[in-house]
Image (cartoon, rainbow, N blue to C red):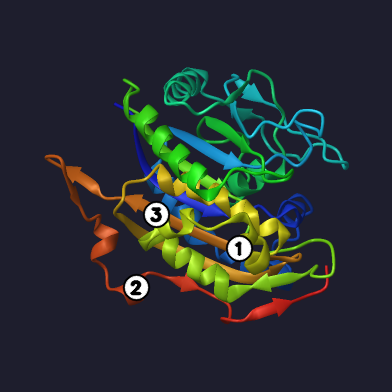
Amino acid sequence: MARIIAGVSSSHVPAIGAAIDNHRTNEPYWQRVFRGFERSKEWIAKAKPDVVIGVYNDHASAFSVEIIPTFALGTATEFGIADEGWGPRPVPVVKGHPELASHIAQSVILDEFDLTLCNKMEVDHGLTVPLNLMFGSPQEWPCPVIPLAVNVVQFPPPTGNRCFNLGRAIRKAVESYPEDLKVVIFGTGGMSHQISGPRAGLINSKFDHAFLDNLTKNPKKLAQMSHMEYMREAGAEGVEMVMWLIMRGALDEQVDEIYRFYTVPASNTAVGHIILENRRRVAGKAKPSPASKKPAAKIKRAAAGQKVHRIRS
């Protein structure tokens, strides 16, 4: 059967994509960001997922204010790259996995989650930037990607609890798919940032680090956070982090934190990243992965200071 082996969360700052596209990744400002993902690229190259489920939010590329689905699942064979005002990004077309996507749709909808099914959809930086950060800049993405777009732009977005439970439904769906596939699920967006209004430039590193801690150890606590709490602590756009809870809900209750990276700022956003692996199962029981046996000090982390930063947008 198919199985979700790990979850990855990452910010999807559009300026990161611009730095890649304009060959500026080695500039001092950007070096720390891209160096923070070097180990991640090594990890995913070894993991070799057969499919990625990419949870992201559309930025008025595939959807407008006329039609705003709460959850939109891409079931197409491929997804073109959206023109966000400067032409489509020079990245490969995203190849889908319509068979698994359709299976997920059937299972999740029958579990009473109402999805919008997209047989044609363009994807923007919300999806392509995390793919770059994890896979680099290949001629073709190394595996099919199933996009899952979540509305976190127009009020009301789904609650963290709804997202967490959707992740659980996705895990159930994947595990009932008969083909032997290794699946990695991405949760993207965030972390703390606000791009307009009196608090533009807000970054709350203390909140971000606590969120990462709880994502690993106590995701049910995060699932109970209200929209207002996200906005107050993480800025208006910080609500994007509910998408990380879809990733976490799709994993087992007990996971191993393989890697964590955090830095500020990138553009006007905090960049957060984490890799969580499901523990290997032996005779129905969870077995810690080899990475979990390493001393905690050997789990590489790069983090900024634990304080609130305010920067210019």
- What amino acid type is highlighted by mark number 3? Leu
Question: Left or right: 136 with respect to 269?
Answer: left
Give, as a three-letter code, the residue at label 2: Lys
- In front: label 1 or label 2: 1
Q: Nearer the viewer, residue 30 or 209?
A: 209
Q: Is residue 176 above or below residue 262?
A: above
Q: Which mark is residue 106?
A: none
Whether tag 1 and tag 2 are in contact, CB under 8 A, the answer is no
Q: Which mark is residue 298?
A: 2
Q: Is residue 275 above or below residue 282?
A: below
What is the C-alpha distance between the residues marked 1 and 2? 33 Å
The answer to whether residue 191 shows anywhere in this view is no
Residue toward you, 151 or 182: 151
| The C terminus lies in quadrant | bottom right
Question: Which residue does the image show at 60% across and 26% down from the upper left?
Answer: 74
What is the distance, in whole Å, between disc 1 and disc 3 at their CAs? 25 Å
Disc 2 crowd rating (10 Å Cα; few below 14, some 14-19, many 20+) is few
User: Which amino acid type corresponds to the residue marked 1 in the rendered image?
Assistant: Glu
Residue denoted by label 1:
229
Q: Quadrant of residue 193?
A: bottom right
